Image (tube, rainbow, N blue to C red):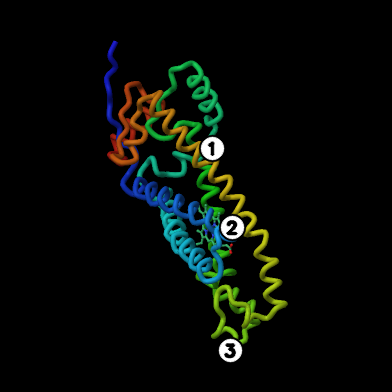
């Protein structure tokens, strides 16, 4: 029996734009991050290394602002962009996760217009990890390059507020720092950079799981998951689990 295909509006324009700006900036940050991590063996040092870190930070600003905007959008955006649509919470979540997982094993996975329960778990952890990278990165950029928003604070710390030293202070140049204050700042920064680097390693695993999950879901469920992030619409051939919410929503015309 041929099933009837139905279109469902799911991702609004802001969510789609966020997604692609996020994907491109995270990928660029990872590539430049790998170069920074291996700078020594690649022979990148001095001004070239500072330049690399500065480029990484500027892309980091785009990434962090985009992430902040998405967090705001989760309060005010379209129905499927909101917190309650992707946080793995609510009294029914565990039951829906069990049902979805067993439907996966049975070979006829339940269909969802928004995120399926496994998708909710992965996306929430993704957001947490991205937020950790944005916070730690913004702090490190202050300690290392004296860049905003915390650069002024760290510059004062390492020069002990001496105006003459502050005027001459440059990233990567220790001539004008007060040695003891600088060492204290470096000890403060050490655990933050450790979190940033381990966050990066975990993020690589997440990016791979995310891409593999999307491809497997697209191939098995033929749900137009990938094109939905471009067109905003999913095409399903089965009744989605969240159909009821969607019907109510259409009455309000607020997708
Ligand atoms: C998904 C987001 C991000 C990833 C995957 C990432 C990854 C990395 C990696 C792998 C390094 C090399 C660590 C090292 O050897 O020092 C690094 C360094 C750095 N990151 Fe990020 N980063 C991200 C976001 C950010 C953001 C948002 C900022 C700032 C706005 C930032 C600022 C920095 C700075 C300043 C360094 C140089 C640290 C040093 O002195 O070595 N990063 N990042």
Residue 144's x, y, as percent? 58, 69
| Sequence-first tag of 1 and 2 | 2
Q: Quadrant of the C terminus?
A: top left
Q: Which mark is residue 89?
A: 1
Mark 3 vs ligand 1: CB under 8 Å? Answer: no
Placement of 185 over or under 211, stated as above or below: below
**Residue in view at x 51 percent, y 38 percent:** 122
Q: Is residue 171 left or right of residue 73?
A: right
Residue lying farthest to the right in this orientation:
180
Return the mark for residue 164. Answer: 3
Q: State which image quarter holds ligand 1.
A: bottom right
Q: Earlier in the sequence, mark 2 or mark 3?
A: 2
The residue that label 2 is drawn on is 41
**Answer yes or no: do the residues labelled 3 and 1 have beta carbons within 8 Å?**
no
Disc nearer the start of the sequence (3/1): 1
Query: Which residue is most to the top?
Result: 1
96, above or below 56, in the image: above
Image quarter hosting the N terminus: top left
Question: Distance between the Cα atoms at labels 2 and 3?
Answer: 36 Å
Q: Residue at x 71, y 71 (%)?
A: 184
């Amino acid at each position: 029996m041929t099933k009837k295909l139905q279109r469902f509006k799911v991702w609004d324009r802001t969510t789609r734009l966020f997604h692609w700006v996020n994907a491109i900036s995270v990928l660029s940050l990872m590539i430049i991050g790998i170069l920074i991590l291996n700078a020594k063996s690649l022979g990148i040092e001095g001004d070239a290394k500072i330049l690399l870190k500065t480029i990484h930070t500027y892309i980091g600003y785009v990434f962090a602002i985009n992430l902040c905007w998405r967090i705001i959008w989760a309060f005010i955006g379209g129905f499927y962009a909101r917190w309650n649509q992707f946080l793995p919470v609510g009294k029914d979540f565990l039951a829906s996760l069990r049902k979805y997982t067993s439907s996966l094993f049975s070979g006829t996975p339940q269909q969802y217009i928004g995120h399926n329960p496994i998708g909710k778990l992965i996306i929430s952890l993704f957001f947490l990890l991205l937020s950790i990278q944005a916070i730690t990165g913004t702090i490190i950029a202050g300690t290392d390059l004296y860049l905003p928003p915390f650069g002024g604070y760290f510059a004062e710390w390492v020069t002990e507020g001496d105006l003459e030293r502050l005027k001459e202070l440059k990233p990567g140049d220790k001539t004008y720092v007060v040695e003891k204050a600088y060492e204290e700042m470096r000890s403060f920064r050490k655990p933050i950079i450790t979190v940033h680097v381990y966050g990066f390693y975990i993020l690589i695993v997440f990016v791979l799981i995310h891409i593999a999950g999307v491809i497997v879901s697209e191939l098995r469920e033929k749900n137009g998951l990938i094109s939905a992030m471009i067109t905003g619409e999913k095409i399903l051939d089965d009744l989605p689990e969240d159909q009821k919410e969607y019907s109510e929503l259409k009455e309000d015309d607020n997708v």
